[in-house]
Amino acid sequence: MRFSKLFAPTTKEAPKDAVLPSHIYLVRGAFIAQIGSGIYNFLPLGNIVLQKIRAIVKEELDKAGCQEVLLGFVTPSELWRESGRYSKFGKELLRFRDRKENEFVLGPTHEEAMVDLVRNRVRSYKQLPLNLYQINTKFRDEARPRYGLLRGREFLMKDGYSFHESVEDMQREYALMEKTYSTILERLGLDFRVVEADSGAIGGSGSKEFMVLADNGEDDIVICKSCDYAANVEAAVAKDEFVPDDEVEMSSGDFHTPDVSSIEDLSNFFKIGKAYLVKAVAKKAIYEDREEIVIFFIRGDRELQETKAQNSVDALELEDIGDEELEKAGVPVGFIGPDIEGFKIVVDETLKDRDNLICGANRKDYHTIGYSFKDKAFDFADLSLVQAGDKCAKCGGELEIKKGIEVGHIFQLGTKYSEALNATFLDREGKAKPFVMGTYGIGVSRLVAVVIEQHHDEKGCIWSEATAPFKFDIIISNRKDSEQLAFATKLYEEMQEAGLSVILDDRDERFGYKMGDFELIGFSYAIIVGKSLKEGEVEIVKRAGLERERVPVNEVMQKIREL
Ligand code: ATP
Ligand code: MG
């Protein structure tokens, strides 16, 4: 490729809303251009990187025995009604009608469509297992599209679906996909962790996420310093080491506590540890057809984990509610206790069977002391947020929290969709059975940004070996110098002939400008053909670290081959 012919309008200006390096550099480096909220066009450089990542994903999946298909991006709503997700998926699902008033959705994920493809076509256990995938555009009407390619509305995803005769066979494939995804991310040069995850709206039993470690990640991941335990904070559990002190003995009854309502104030007022206090958190749970106030009770020394709380009441979403609205609904804000009536209640597991507790008395300015959960028939669930310094449930080691970006997610799906869509096969006994399924996703376009989020400096992108749009950038320092031009062109042709990934910066621009583009775009090496050519040397600059090295012209080709 000659740079003079390349459509790469790099710029000094970053988009106004861009805060993350990947967003800034991908736009400035002319990889992508925004066309609408959460919708991006890929320019030639961006497309080269995207296709490179796509090819690696495909190569590893094909090696693992998966088969590529391509489903319609537009899916008839009927299929989504059959699974029950049409109404459940919420506003991320874009619904529309055609001229004949038929209803459709823009596929945000393709469980329904893939089950439909297989049902009535795979009829016997003899045709199983089967793992089908596509690398296709997805649309999700995200509430807050942001961070460039990291959270778009339209994006490229690899989504795979496997079909099995038994849970054991699905789990074998699930393990194979974990290995395959790990190999893909290793090849891309990413530092990542595989973590236990919450299964969210897709449903099913076990699931794992692939998290690339990055300071700007949106996800908190809990990692054990001593063993291999790692989990998304939405699914993480810690060992609860708190043992109530036998000496603590409370009388029971209501106590006047004027203006004392925060956990901090209560702890000081009663001169007692926060673990003896019961904290109430009220939220609005949003369902398909209604909304409802739910009150969660957790130990005073813990925080509520929203996803766990949402799962415990099977809501589509949880929203915060203001004090005013709560009071209007009859909630004694600041003094809420578990015996409150008329609201749905969920209590954290760590409070089960505890007594000698202090909680709200459900009337203004009063708290109940000596409260007991013994023999109480509440709904108990794990609601606690795991925090840094907590102890690992597996080995007792210390847990730490790191930031991660989710790039992949694998699920043990089971029969949820095959049952809903009545997709069955004949088993070894000749009986009709629903397929046991697994589902596996990788964010292909998100990965373009993730590579840069993990590898950049203050000048621009630093692509990994496998993702660099071109590996070598031959920069002609002064195009008017015929000697430089001739040498660089000859080197370029020789490298092309040798099948090397090379671009020749033959533009009629200042040297500094070309160097700036090299640093911004992030080719792996620059070969500078400049003044030193007179002394029989060129300069090679490595993008990662920007180290420079002079190389005699007769050794250049060999040096390049070594790199
Ligand atoms: P997130 O929690 O980041 O919204 P998700 O749990 O909704 O992700 P999945 O439904 O598991 O994601 O989709 C599989 C993969 O698709 C994700 O691991 C991610 O890499 C990618 N992905 C999901 N949403 C987006 C998006 N809005 N923009 C770009 N990639 C996305
Ligand atoms: Mg999402």
Image (cartoon, grey):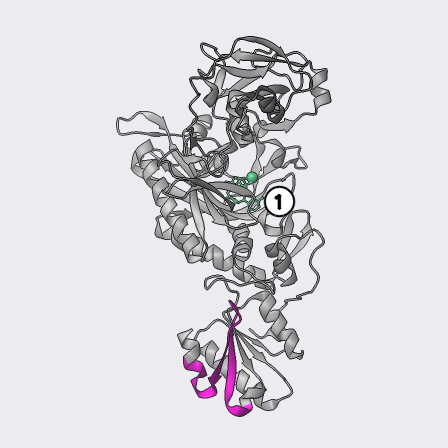
Neighbor class of circle 1 (other Cα within 10 Å; few <14, some 14-19, many 20+) is: many
Q: Which residue is mark 1?
A: 153
Residue 402: x percent and y percent?
A: 50, 45
Q: Quadrant of ligand 2?
A: top right
The answer to whether residue 312 is left or right of residue 284 is left
User: Residue 99 location in percent, x, y?
Assistant: 68, 37
- Residue 80 drawn above or below residue 230: above
Q: Residue at x 44, y 21 (%)?
A: 244
x, y percentage for residue 168?
Answer: 31, 34
When asked about the image quadrant of residue 42, the answer is bottom right
Range shown magenta: 534-558
Q: Is residue 555 magenta?
A: yes
For the residue pair 440 and 286, the one nearer the viewer reads as 286
Residue type beneath disc 1: Arg
Quarter of the picture containing the N terminus is bottom right
Most foreground residue, 362 or 34: 362
- Residue 372 highlighted magenta (yes or no): no
Question: Foreground residue, 267 or 116?
Answer: 267
Quadrant (top left/top right/bottom left/bottom right) for the C terminus: bottom left
Mark 1 residue CB less than 8 A from any atom of ligand 1: yes
Residue at 51% x, 62% y is 463
Q: Can residue 32 be seen at all in this image of the molecule?
A: no
Along the line of sight, the residue nearer the viewer: 481 or 225: 225
